[in-house]
Amino acid sequence: MSPLCFLCSLLLTVFPPFTSPSPTILFQGFNWESCNKKGGWYNFLKKRIPDIASAGITHVWLRPPSQSAAPQGYMPGRLYDLNASSYGSQNELKSLIQAFNKKGIKCLADIVINHRTAEKKDSRGIWCIFEGGTPDKRLDWGPSFICRHDTTYSDGRGHPDSGEPFGPAPDIDHLNPRVQKELSDWMNWLKTEIGFDGWRFDFVKGYAPSITRLYMKNTMPHFAVAEKWDSLSYRQDGKLDGRQDAHRRNLKYWVQAAGGAVTAFDFTTKGILQAAVQGELWRLKDSSGKPPGFIGLLPQNAVTFIDNHDTGSTQRLWPFPSDKVMLGYAYILTHPGTPSIFYDHLFDWVLKKEIGKLAAIRTKNGINTTSRVNILASQSDLYVAAIDDKIITKIGPKMDLRNLIPRNFKVATSGKDYAVWQKK
């Protein structure tokens, strides 16, 4: 074997490509208020599984499972303590995952490891003594496990922060070998003991992409997606810039630096799409005739979405136009990348039937992460694209399609300002 072939073989062994079912459809199984559900969210969501399965979902992203100083779970402390979660007990979580698995649905844990809340103060009176939630010393750390430049909490002995700072809680030193080992062990415990199959990495800007690469290698998830949320480019008048190439390239560079096996939420596509559906559908075609988001560069590593617990829900930090949500789903469920459906839209907005039809069309026609897109029209009031020469998607109010739809295609589903055709 040549040295080059040996190297390629070694890389595939260390970072094998995902073997997820194709097409994969992700579902975010919570919103910002799920922690307040009477009787516990795990028990409540379990009752929704038949509807989730019938919508064509293959993977469900669940909340951070550990004890947390904030009820939503994003200020974790005792990582092994799954009984102090506001969503339910460890046994209720395991029962939920088992119920999903019986329907052929895999579950992703929300991995919040950039920062961590302490259990008690040290001799200086600073909250920096961590406990892992077990009788032994696993994840029991002190101030030296905090990044050196996090001067609010650190004792100055940790490594420099390899990413962006996080003010509300201590930034964990991911260059510390014990941190790497014990977090990897904890994540593998979530797989073997609790039943998770993959990860949603929270706030990956907080540490170097090489750290994500390391945890991917050490835990070998079935599927993983990262949250790398950067601001898009805007003009002086506040409108979205016509080109977002730098934004999507940054996602591409991060994925590649993280080893190439992890996916990333396509914030580029979200930003462009939610501007495009407001009378600017010309935005949905880049200068080379491809989709303008991350799916136009590395669709196999892109997870598209309309809203999540931060951008939508009760936080509404960057919401999709509420009257255009189905136009968004008509786009992401018929285009490449891995589409993600938000809990609120499927259930609270009573869009299960419409979204389910689009998901069924995707599955029936085998539209997947690397499907080919041929954009036939991209005007202010009309977007038409053929995907894999199997389906055609139309978005926008314009009804005059001229000869864009071949006679051997028939309408598979339609709604206000959108339609999808498939071959007869």
Image: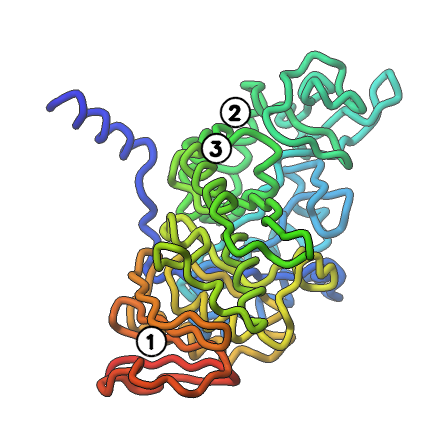
Mark found first going from the N terminus, 3 or 1: 3
Q: Is residue 292 left or right of residue 71?
A: left
Dot 2 falls on a residue whose secondary structure is helix
**Tally of numbered discs:** 3
Which of the 4 quarters of the picture holds residue 407? bottom left
Q: Which residue is mark 2?
A: 181
Q: Quadrant of the C terminus?
A: bottom left
Q: Nearer the viewer, residue 232 or 338?
A: 232
Which of the 4 quarters of the picture holds residue 134? top right
Mark found first going from the N terminus, 1 or 2: 2
- The nearer-to-camera label among 1 and 2 is 1
Callout 1 amino acid:
Ile
Q: Is residue 103 left or right of residue 141?
A: left
Q: Which mark is residue 300?
A: none
Callout 3 amino acid:
Tyr
C-alpha span from label 3 to label 1: 39 Å
Q: Residue at x 33, y 76 (%)?
A: 392
Residue reaching furthest to the top: 157
- The nearer-to-camera label among 3 and 1 is 1
Callout 2 amino acid:
Lys
Can residue 105 be seen here? The reply is: no
Q: Nearer the viewer, residue 95 or 343?
A: 343
Give the answer, above or below, for where 258 lies relative to 98: above
- The nearer-to-camera label among 3 and 2 is 3
For disc 3, the neighbor class at 10 Å (few under 14, some 14 to 19, many from 20) is some
Q: Nearer the viewer, residue 38 or 69?
A: 69
